[in-house]
Image: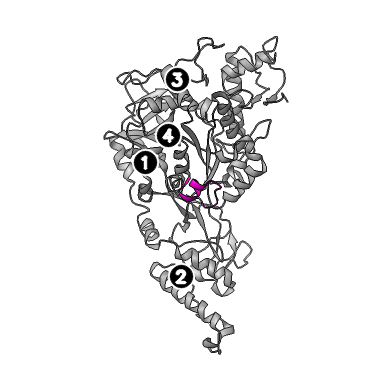
């Protein structure tokens, strides 16, 4: 596509051709709309955003009213300030030079052995304390406390799922993407099955809170209704919608139009959860959530801690008791899972301690010389990479709800479909592009987002729990053919976890074969051993002969 010049502002007449020569007072309806136009123009002009009215004369009355409402709620002073400072040096980058590794960190057991019992049918994997200077908190203590909190109904699950699968070439909510290697189960189904497995194990209901965005909200509601909530109690599926921010042209700061009557907007990031989960959800069937918000609903049920994750990681070990236990025993407001970085430039957030407070510094903000620092044993000093799996205290989130508006915005350059404003713009074949919607070939827009981890400096006793990447982190981000985080690499991780468990039970999965295990068939190595024994599925020669999907009710 030929380059398009940006920033053209179109000055429109206040009256359409049909109005010229007529007495405006004889047409009260037109008079009202022209007055609205003038008011909007007066509001937009000081910010150079008059182009939003470029197609006013083409719009119906309803479209004009809709566009007016959209413009009225935009904070143009904020947008102007964000654009002016978009290239300022990151505050995090300046702090990074004082960054140290987290002071308190634990290593999670790698086989999801929720019982840690003496009669476990496989050799247990030791969970090691990384910092022996702190209080003695053993893995068994952590598991015991975590299981107690689960059985007492003090835990709820939150997933942020507002995004679409755009980078996957999937124009729907990402949670609807079918990722099961053999089952073709969606991301949502896999996560719900893990929750159901934990409910069954601990005899408790685990509320599942789903953050949507305006573009995915109804779609996700309908998806869960169509699938009968995958077996969850209807009152335990709490769907809440995050806010959005206008998408702006990267070079000019001009707000983009998705169509001639609609502002292009993007979800305001996972940090939007703090405001959204504390806001009334008017379409909820639950009175407290409808009037006060989802967090108030959870608190009314006695929920004290939230297990938080992002929708794109089907390997996440939801409500791992050991993880919960470390969080509770340390009286932590905010606990993070981390993977150990192999390379200073790994594209994960860096969990660091700065002046006694825990922070996450984005990989793009970490100076090369800081990221490359090494300890005496040759390992990276800044080693802890965030995977967006957290435990968060409910009281902490409620107490800081008012801080949601003060969370800083982060900038991301993205591709955004938009209406062409430049009257001179031409397509590849010379066709005029003015007024058409184009899908740019390269990033063209700035999206403003908030991140939930910016709450970390406010948290008491934040801690880090290291996990094995191979067993707990496989994000789905890119379409097939890319190098990493594709459907193929995620599926390989899913079947790889099954192979790992089977290997510990003395069963070999040949390279050309693969086993997918539903969490409802087995959600840990211990459960797998028990299920295979009951079903007499242990292969006589210890070798898997065929690829298969092992589900709750059958072996396919």
Circle nearer the N terminus (2, 3)? 2
Q: Position of residue 358 (x, y in %)?
A: 33, 35
Residue underneath mark 1: 455
Quarter of the picture containing the N terminus is: bottom right
Is the C-beta separation of discs 2 and 3 under 8 Å?
Answer: no
The span picked out in magenta is 282-293
Q: Position of residue 15 (x, y in %)?
A: 52, 81
Give the camera-side residue of 171 and 28. 28
Marks 2 and 3 sit apart, C-alpha to C-alpha, by 62 Å
Tell whether 105 sits left or right of 58.
Answer: left
- Mark 2, mark 3: which one is toward the viewer? 3
Q: Is residue 146 visible?
A: yes
Residue underneath mark 4: 304
Q: Please, is residue 166 above or below residue 5 in the view?
A: above
Q: Quadrant of residue 122?
A: top right
The local crowd at label 1, few if under 14, some if 14 to 19, many if 20 or more residues have their Cα within 10 Å, is: many
The local crowd at label 2, few if under 14, some if 14 to 19, many if 20 or more residues have their Cα within 10 Å, is: many
SS assignment at label 4: loop
Give the camera-side residue of 12 and 523. 523
């Amino acid at each position: 596509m030929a380059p398009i010049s940006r920033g053209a502002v179109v000055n429109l007449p206040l009256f359409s051709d049909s109005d010229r020569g007529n007495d405006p007072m004889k047409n009260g309806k037109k008079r009202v709309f022209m007055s609205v136009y003038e008011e909007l123009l007066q509001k937009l002009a000081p910010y150079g955003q008059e182009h939003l009215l470029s197609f006013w004369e083409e719009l119906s009355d309803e479209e004009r009213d809709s566009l007016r409402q959209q413009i009225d709620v935009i904070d143009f002073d904020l947008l102007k300030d964000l654009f002016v400072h978009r290239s300022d040096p990151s505050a995090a980058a300046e702090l990074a030079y004082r960054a140290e590794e987290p002071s308190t960190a634990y290593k999670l057991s790698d086989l999801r052995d929720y019982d840690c019992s003496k009669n476990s049918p496989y050799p247990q994997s030791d969970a090691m304390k990384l910092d022996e200077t702190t209080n003695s908190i053993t893995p068994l203590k952590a598991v015991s406390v975590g299981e107690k909190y689960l059985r007492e109904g003090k835990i709820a699950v939150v997933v942020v799922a507002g995004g679409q699968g755009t980078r996957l070439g999937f124009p729907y909510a990402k949670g609807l993407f079918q990722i099961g290697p053999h089952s073709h189960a969606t991301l949502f189904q896999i996560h719900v099955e893990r929750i159901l497995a934990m409910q069954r194990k601990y005899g408790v209901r685990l509320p599942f809170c789903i953050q949507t965005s305006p573009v995915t909200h109804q779609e996700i509601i309908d998806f869960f209704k169509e699938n009968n909530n995958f077996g969850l109690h209807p009152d335990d599926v709490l769907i809440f919608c995050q806010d959005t921010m206008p998408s702006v042209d990267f070079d000019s700061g001009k707000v983009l139009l998705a169509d001639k009557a609609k502002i292009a907007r993007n979800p305001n990031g996972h940090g939007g959860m703090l405001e959204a989960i504390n806001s009334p959800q008017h379409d909820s069937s639950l009175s407290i959530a409808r009037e006060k918000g989802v967090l108030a609903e959870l608190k009314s049920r006695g929920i004290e801690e939230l297990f938080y994750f992002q929708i794109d990681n089907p390997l996440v070990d939801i409500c791992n008791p050991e993880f919960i236990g470390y969080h509770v025993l340390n009286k932590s407001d905010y606990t993070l899972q981390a993977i150990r970085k192999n390379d200073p430039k790994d594209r994960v957030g860096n969990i660091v301690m700065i002046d006694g407070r825990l922070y996450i510094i984005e990989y793009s903000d970490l100076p090369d010389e800081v990221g490359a620092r090494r300890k005496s044993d040759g390992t990276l000093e800044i080693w802890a990479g965030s995977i967006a799996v957290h435990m968060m205290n409910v009281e902490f989130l409620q107490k800081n709800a008012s801080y949601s508006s003060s969370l800083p915005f982060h900038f991301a350059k993205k591709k955004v479909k938009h209406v062409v404003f430049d009257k001179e713009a031409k397509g590849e074949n010379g066709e005029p592009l003015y007024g058409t919607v184009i899908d740019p070939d390269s990033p063209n827009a700035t999206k403003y987002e908030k991140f939930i981890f910016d709450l970390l400096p406010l948290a008491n006793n934040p801690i880090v729990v290291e996990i094995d990447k191979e067993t707990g982190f496989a994000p789905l981000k890119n379409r097939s053919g890319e190098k990493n985080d594709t459907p193929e690499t995620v599926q390989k991780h899913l079947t790889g976890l099954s192979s790992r468990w089977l290997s510990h039970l003395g069963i070999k999965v040949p390279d050309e074969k693969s086993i997918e295990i539903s969490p409802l068939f087995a959600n840990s190595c211990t459960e797998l051993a028990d299920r295979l024994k009951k079903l007499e599925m242990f292969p006589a020669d210890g070798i898997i002969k065929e690829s298969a999907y092992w589900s709750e009710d059958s072996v396919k």
